[in-house]
Amino acid sequence: MAAARRLTQRSARQQARRFLVEGPQAVAAALELGAAGHADLVTELFVTPAARERHPDLLAVARNAAVSVVPVTPAVLASMAETVTPQGIVAVARFLDVGLEQVLAGQPRLVAVLAAVRDPGNAGTVLRCADAAGADAVVLTTDSVDVYNGKCVRASAGSLFHLPVVRSVEPTVAVTQLRQAGLRVLAAAGGGPTDLDDLADAGGLTGPTGWLFGNEAWGLSGRLTALADDVVRVPIHGRAESLNLATAAGVCLYASARAHRDHGR
């Protein structure tokens, strides 16, 4: 039943090209982006009486942007939401993903590629890490979770609205185009032959870089790692067997961010 409901939700999103933004933090980020030039990004805002009391400034921003504010009961809001605790506020927004060609035209220095990442919480958390590290874009391949999944949007904590997101790109196409655009593609894998610290110390992270992160359970396919310029492991100094996807991605992205900062971008 849960899988069927998720499929129905995704189908409805695709047909309407709209998605739900749940919680005040994400809604505020969506409204901010709308005010910064993405007119009509947010089309409706549903709020409970308690949320109206808690977030008057947010509602004022919505009204100033001519967003329709609709009062609803907590029960109605709960029936709309895809997550368990929407905190009394849910917005409807238009799709805002961009094409990979558009991202590459901007000569990005740091891009995260999620290949077959299925867990929405992980995908959203990596998006948040990429945003915090100053990445220029995040790419989700065709076999990855829908970035507009409610849990993914919530896990991104507003970062979905802070940097370009590309979705539904065939994995080998993503890697090939990144390399053709001059980015060095590094595949993150626990058994990789190259140590991240050694790579950073040798100056191997100073150039434009695309990080390739794989599925939570089986990692990256041999086909993808073969296309990468190098396969890199995050060193484990303690007794932990491995790092989870989001943590490893955060370590890799911040290593690149530091190298770019030290090198003057």
Image (cartoon, helix red, strand yellow):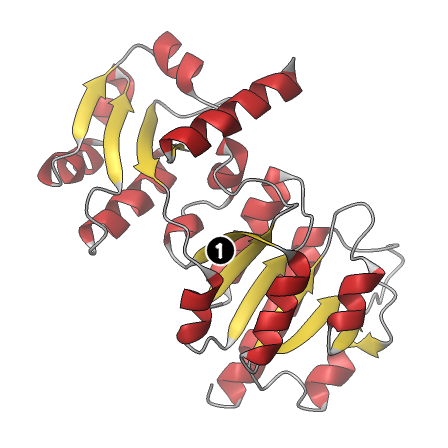
In the figure, is residue 219 to the left or right of 212?
A: right
Q: Which residue is more in the foreground, 57 or 259?
A: 259
Q: Which residue is more in the foreground, 129 or 102?
A: 102
Q: Quadrant of residue 48?
A: top left
Q: Residue 25, percent across and down?
A: 36, 40
Number of numbered discs overlaid on the protein picture = 1
Q: Which residue matches tag 1?
A: 166
Q: Is residue 189 visible?
A: no
Q: Residue 170, percent across and down?
A: 63, 55
Q: Residue 42, percent across and down?
A: 26, 38
Quarter holding the N terminus? top right
Q: Quadrant of residue 86?
A: top left
Identified at 47% across, 75% down, the residue is 108
Q: Is residue 66 visible?
A: yes
Disc 1 crowd, CA 10 A, few/some/many (<14, 14-19, 20+): many
Q: Which residue is more in the foreground, 134 or 173?
A: 173
Badge 1 element: strand
Q: Residue 198, percent across and down?
A: 77, 84
Identified at 18% across, 25% down, the residue is 69
In the figure, is residue 62 to the left or right of 150?
A: left
In the figure, is residue 145 to the left or right of 39?
A: right
Identified at 74% across, 49% down, the residue is 215
User: 254 above or below 79?
Assistant: below
Q: Amino acid at mark 1?
A: Val
